[in-house]
Amino acid sequence: MPGPDDHVDNNRTVSVVIKSTRLLGASQGRVMIEWTLDGLPSDQWVKAFMTADCAKRGSPAFVSGESGDPLVYPEGTIRWSVSSDDMRFAAAYVVECIVSANGRFEEQRNSKSAQRKRGSGLAQLR
């Protein structure tokens, strides 16, 4: 029997890809970057993205986390304000985290599916 985490929202997607990237603004050496995603990320995918073990490269301030982390918005965007010198590093980091989140999220879904199948198989044996 499916649990509360197994609910599938038909408006949410499993695999997330970047549809477009744009600069929202620049001020005092910083830029706001927005990535528009192809589909709406589920809450579980957002958690996988935010906890992805991806390496930051770039300036010492960027690597140490002074720029914070990218934020995922429910309407299917990611936004991040970074130093203009670290733009390409931020873009690479977001792509790496998306790939990681897609993999982790798919693994979780496959694991839950296998558990359900095993559970239904045991129920049939009884």
Image (tube, helix red, strand yellow):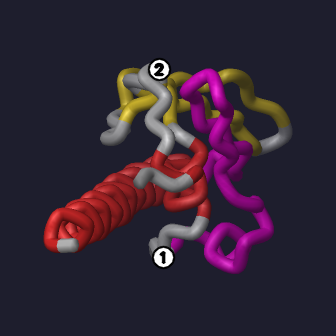
Front position among marks 2 and 1: 2
Q: Is residue 40 above or below residue 110?
A: above
Residue at image position (17%, 63%) is 124
Q: Cβ–Cβ below 8 Å for labels 2 and 1? A: no
Front-most of 64 and 49? 49
The Cα–Cα distance between marks 2 and 1, rounded to whole angstroms, is 27 Å
Reading the chain from its start, which is encountered first: label 2 or label 1? 2
What SS does tag 2 mark? loop
Residue at image position (46%, 49%) is 6
The amino acid type, in three-letter code, at marker 2 is Asn
Q: Quadrant of the N terminus?
A: bottom left
Residue 41 x, y percent position in the rendering: 50, 36
Q: Which mark is residue 11?
A: 2
* Range shown magenta: 56-85
Is residue 48 visible in this depiction of the protein? yes
Residue at image position (60%, 25%) is 23
* Magenta stretch holds residue 103: no
* Magenta stretch holds residue 76: yes
Question: Which residue matches tag 1?
Answer: 53
Q: Is residue 44 above or below residue 78?
A: below
Residue 28 x, y percent position in the rendering: 84, 40
Residue 120 x, y percent position in the rendering: 24, 61
Q: Quadrant of residue 81?
A: top right
Q: Is residue 55 above or below residue 41?
A: below
